[in-house]
Amino acid sequence: MQPIISVSNLSKTYETGFQALKGVDLEVRKGEIFALLGPNGAGKTTLISVICGLVNRSGGQVTVDGHDILTDYRAARALIGLVPQELTTDAFETVWATVSFTRGLFGKPADPAHIEKVLRGLSLWDKRDEKIVTLSGGMKRRLLIAKALSHEPRILFLDEPTAGVDVELRRDMWEMVRGLKSSGVTIILTTHYIEEAEEMADRVGVISEGRIILVEEKAELMRKLGRKQLTLQLKDPLDALPDSLGGHDLTVSDDGLALTYDYDTRADRTGITRLLRQLDEAGIRFTDLDTRQSTLEEIFVDLVRNDR
Ligand SMILES: Nc1ncnc2c1ncn2[C@@H]1O[C@H](COP(=O)(O)OP(=O)(O)OP(=O)(O)O)[C@@H](O)[C@H]1O
C-alpha cells in the first residue's frame, strides 16, 4: 500500500548535542492506525514534532503525501492534525472561537457546520461559549483534539492521548479514533500504554534510544514474538519437581497444585508433547490445562531489554 508518510534516515541532534533520533526509517500507510511505542525519552515526541514541522531535522528526509516537510511545508502541514500533550492556547478565548480560529490558521474557509460536528463529537458542544480557563482537565484534552480536527486533516497525530485521562474519556477517544479511521484518516499515536496499542493499532513501531527497533503488524508481532505459558492444574499437590522433568522451564505454584511451562511459539518444537509424556511417566496427573499468550507489554519489555 502507498505510504502517506515516508521517513528516511532521519536524525535529530538537539543544541545540547543530544542525539534524539539516529537514522530513523519509517513508512506509515494510508488509512492505518500506527502506534509508536517506546519508553520515556525514546524519541517519540521528537519524531512526530519533526514530521509535523515543529522541530527541525538534522539530517534525512520526510515526506507527507509526497510533500517534503521542509521545501513544501504548507502543503504537508495542511494535511496534518496534531494533538499535543499539553494545551498552549489563549485561556480567555471561548471554545468555539479557538477551534474556529485554528481552522483559519490552515487557510481553510470558515465552516460552522464542521466545527459544530467536531464539538458535538467530542461532547464539547455545551461548552462552546465557555472560556478555556473554566474547562476541566478532561475538557481541555477534548479541546486539543477539536483544534487538531478543525481543518479536516487527513492524518492525525496523537501524542500520548490518554496519559492521565479518566476511563470515560479514554473510551471516547478510542471511539473517536475508530470513527476517524473509518472515514479514511490515517492515525499515528504515541503511547506508553501497551493496551492502547493492543486495542487500537493496525501496526506497531517500537522506538528505543532514537532508533526504530521494530515495525510489525500488531497481530503478527504478537504471534511471532509471543511467548506462551501452559498451566496445568494438578490432581495432587507436588512438593518438588521430579529430576526427570529438570530439562524443562517449569515452575510449581506455592500450593503445589499448578505447574506452569514457558515456551516459545516460534521454536520448531515447543516441547509440549515431551513434557506431557514425561509427566505421565512420572505419574503426575492433571485435571485441567490452559495456555496464555504474552501481552504486548511483555513483548515490548523484552524487545527494549534485548536492544540494550
Ligand atoms: N529541546 C530539547 N533539547 C535537548 N534535548 C531534548 C529536547 N527535547 C527533547 N530532548 C531529549 O531528547 C530525548 C527524546 O525526547 P522525546 O521527548 O522525543 O522522547 P519521548 O519518547 O517522547 O519521551 P516521553 O515518553 O517521556 O514523552 C530525551 O532524552 C529528551 O531529554
Image: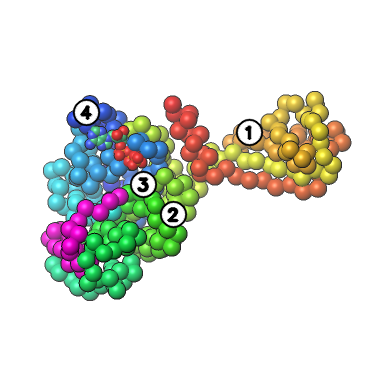
Q: Which one is earlier in the sequence, the residue at label 4 or at label 1?
A: 4
- Residue 199 in sight in this render: yes
Question: How far apart are labels 1 and 3 at the CA level?
Answer: 35 Å
The reply, left or right, for residue 84 in relation to residue 297 is: left
Q: Which residue is mark 3?
A: 190
Question: How far apart are labels 4 and 1 at the CA level?
Answer: 48 Å
The mark found on residue 268 in the picture is 1
User: Quick check: is the Cβ at mark 4 less than 8 Å away from ligand 1?
Assistant: yes
Q: Which one is earlier in the sequence, the residue at label 3 or at label 4?
A: 4
Q: Nearer the viewer, mark 4 or mark 1?
A: 4
The secondary element bearing badge 3 is classed as: strand
Q: Nearer the viewer, mark 1 or mark 2?
A: 2
Q: Which residue is mark 4?
A: 16
202 inside magenta stretch:
no
What amino acid is at disc 2? Met
Q: Which residue is mark 2?
A: 200
The quarter of the rendered structure image containing the C terminus is top left
- Residue 33 in sight in this render: no
The secondary element bearing badge 2 is classed as: helix
The secondary element bearing badge 1 is classed as: loop
Q: Residue furthest front?
A: 134
The magenta stretch is 85-108
Q: Which one is earlier in the sequence, the residue at label 2 or at label 3?
A: 3
User: Quick check: is the Cβ at mark 3 less than 8 Å away from ligand 1?
Assistant: yes
* Closer to us: 248 or 90: 90
Q: Nearer the viewer, mark 4 or mark 2?
A: 4
Q: Nearer the viewer, mark 1 or mark 3?
A: 3
Q: Which one is earlier in the sequence, the residue at label 1 or at label 2?
A: 2
Identified at 82% across, 40% down, the residue is: 237
Label pair 4/2, CB-CB below 8 angstroms: no
89 inside magenta stretch:
yes
Identified at 26% across, 28% down, the residue is: 18
